[in-house]
């Protein structure tokens, strides 16, 4: 049989197809990433182009064999060779498809991981913000309690100062009252001379002072008007007062009140 004119080109193109098939097969067990996928896609594109040319040349080879009067066995051998190449190309393209899917799964897993990391970061951020809020609330509460204690202490101190001032004012007032009370006659002092005249003196209505500070002014005004404001001579004025206790609380009782 005469050698077909397209056989040399056919064999050369078959070699290119085989080379790109082998190039794709070496990525079969390689971990996929974007760079590796780009290399696989380049090999796939070259394989498809060379295989398309291989099939066109194979048709020319078949015509040449027919014109050359090739036997049935020779035709069958050529067909088997083309089928084998087609299967190898199909296997290589399956590798490319699997690698595409593998990269998609990797990218999907990475996307899920990024999403989970983002959610975790958001959760941590919210947790930090919540912790900061609770810490600030606690600090505010502590500050409020501290200020409340300061205010209470200041109020108690002011109240004590007011009470002390009131007590001091009372003591000063009682001292003034005591100083205003005439001193009692010393023991053994000569008694006042008895009244000579038999003039009838008016009956005085003087309310006794019993030690109530609030009643002192009224008592003193009434006493002063009834005794010192009267036109009766002093000696006669004294007689109705003799033996009467207009002040029923003595100095000792007033001093007890001061305590």
Image (cartoon, rainbow, N blue to C red):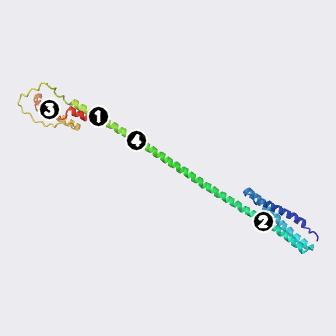
Q: Nearer the viewer, residue 71 or 151?
A: 71
**What residue is pinned by disc 2?**
91
Under circle 2, the secondary element is: helix
Distance CA(mark 4)–CA(mark 1): 26 Å
Which is more N-terminal, label 3 or label 2?
Answer: 2
- Badge 2 crowding class, 10 Å Cα cut-off, few under 14, some 14 to 19, many 20 or more, is some
| Sooner in the amino-acid sequence: mark 4 or mark 2 | 2
Q: Position of residue 152 (x, y in %)?
A: 39, 42
Q: Position of residue 186 (x, y in %)?
A: 16, 26
> Mark 4 Cα within 10 Å, few/some/many (few <14, many 20+)?
few
Q: Which residue is mark 4?
A: 151
Location of the C terminus (image quadrant): top left
What number is the disc on residue 169? Answer: 1
Residue at 85% from the left image edge and 64% from the top image edge: 14
The residue tagged 3 is 227
Q: Earlier in the sequence, mark 1 or mark 2?
A: 2
Whichever of callouts 4 and 1 sits on the residue coming sooner in the sequence is 4
CB atoms of marks 2 and 3 within 8 Å: no
Question: In the picture shown, does residue 148 fall above or below 73?
Answer: above
* SS type, badge 4: helix
């Amino acid at each position: 049989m005469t050698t077909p004119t397209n056989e040399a080109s056919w064999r050369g193109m078959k070699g290119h197809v085989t080379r790109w098939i082998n190039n794709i097969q070496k990525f079969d067990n390689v971990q996929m990433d974007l760079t590796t996928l780009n290399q696989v896609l380049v090999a796939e594109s070259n394989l498809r182009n060379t295989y398309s040319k291989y099939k066109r040349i194979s048709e020319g080879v078949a015509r040449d064999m027919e014109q050359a009067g090739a036997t049935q066995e020779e035709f069958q051998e050529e067909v088997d060779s083309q089928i084998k190449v087609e299967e190898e190309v199909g296997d290589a393209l399956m590798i490319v498809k699997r690698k595409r899917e593998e990269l998609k799964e990797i990218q999907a897993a990475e996307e899920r991981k990024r999403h989970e990391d983002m959610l975790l970061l958001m959760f941590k951020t919210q947790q930090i913000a919540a912790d900061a809020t609770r810490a600030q609330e606690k600090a505010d509460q502590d500050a409020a309690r501290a200020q409340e204690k300061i205010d209470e202490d200041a109020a108690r101190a002011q109240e004590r100062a007011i009470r002390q001032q009131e007590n001091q004012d009372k003591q000063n007032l009682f001292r003034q009252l005591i100083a205003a009370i005439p001193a009692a006659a010393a023991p053994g002092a000569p008694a006042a001379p008895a009244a000579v005249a038999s003039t009838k003196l008016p009956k005085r209505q003087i309310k006794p002072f019993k030690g109530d500070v609030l009643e002192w002014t009224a008592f003193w005004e009434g006493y002063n008007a009834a005794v010192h404001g009267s036109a009766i001579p002093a000696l006669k004025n004294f007689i109705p007062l003799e033996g009467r206790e207009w002040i029923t609380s003595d100095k000792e009782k007033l001093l007890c009140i001061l305590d």
